[in-house]
Amino acid sequence: LERDISSKLGLVDFVSASNGTIAIQMAIKALELRGEIITTPFTWIATVSAIQLEGCKPVFVDIDPDTLNINTAEIERHITSKTVAIMPVHVFGNPCDILGIQTIADRCGLKVIYDAAHAVGSSYCNQSVLNYGDISATSLHATKLLNTAEGGGCVTTNPELINKLKRIRFFGHDDSKAVVEEGMNGKMTEIHAALGLANMKYYDLVLADRKRKYLYYLDGLKNLKNARFQTLQFGESNYSYFAIIFDREDLLIETIERLEAEKIYARRYFYPAVNTFTNLYPYHESPVAEDISRRILCLPLYWKLEDKNLDRIIRLVSYGN
């Protein structure tokens, strides 16, 4: 599976892991980070959990209102003497401002770990987004475009880090089975790998199918008066999620109710913004992420979704709008 993913995506190596959260933790361990890690408040809680579980402190930088990714222009003013890394997220598979982020990291002596959970199949400068940063950590969960039911992995172009990641996922063992560093049980199982190999056969078809359906939604909903869509600014998305940003939360709630009355289930994703989880860490104001998280809805988008049901969803979303 690792060999096939590497070949398909044009990677030096794919270091598989038991899930995407563990993959992020492995990346932090491999880079030996201790301190503050700048990240986005518009993400799944796993991004922040992995930072904290590895003894680091998350520092939230608000998002760009159009791309929904971390706002590159806001990063530097959050850097302190304790900052050790930047952890952006390619939200919904939409590539970040990779050049801008790397320029800041190089200037300030910081590492970059991409949370690329959504980003298998996304590209930047004609190669996989997973090839960027010091390490990219991705997910192969059942909800993802390429899945192993549960799983994930790390990608880096640095051979030393590849070997270190492989040791970390196997209790810190080297090839002679000596324990040479702190590790964990982060291995993917053979059963999950087998499922991934089966799904690899459909990868190109699934990637093309997602883009076609994304564009189908976009065309059918382009005349909405009270909503807008994520801007794809850098590179090429894998189109794995279709998100609508309503002008007001009440419009979102009304839309959910209309869809659920027809047994169609959309998802408020990501809601609420993770910077508001004050039982886990102090609140850090991120007004853009907090506002958009209340107004954003991801519509159903998957392989067996038929055009007639896309039309139903478009009709229900468009009602009165």
Image: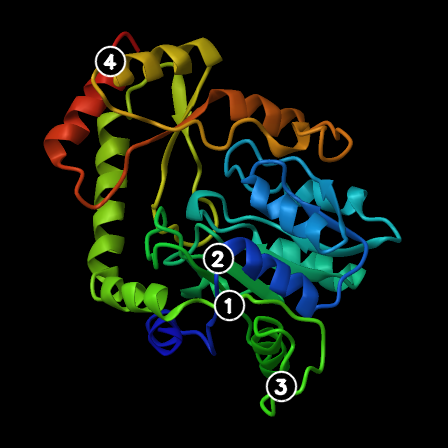
169 relative to 235, above or below: below
Residue 248 visible in rendering: no
First-in-chain label (2 vs 3)? 2
Q: Are marks 2 and 4 in contact (CB under 8 Å)?
A: no
For mark 3, give the secondary structure: loop
Q: Position of residue 76 (x, y in %)?
A: 77, 47
For marks 1 and 2 on the same chain, the one whose residue lies earlier in the sequence:
2
Comes first in the chain, label 3 or label 4: 3
Q: Tell me the kind of residue under disc 3.
A: Asp
**At 68% from the left edge and 82% from the top edge, which residue is drawn?**
179
Which mark, residue 261? 4
Q: Which mark identifies residue 174?
A: 3
Looking at this rendering, what residue extends furthest in the right direction?
A: 81
Mark 3, mark 1: which one is toward the viewer?
3
**Residue that label 2 marks:** 19
Callout 4: 10 Å neighbours few (<14), some, many (20+)? few
Q: Earlier in the sequence, mark 1 or mark 4?
A: 1
72 vs 111: above or below = above
Mark 2 to mark 3 CA distance (whole Å): 22 Å
Q: CA distance from mark 1 to mark 4?
A: 43 Å
1 or 2: mark nearer the eye: 2
Q: Residue at x 21, y 36 (%)?
A: 216
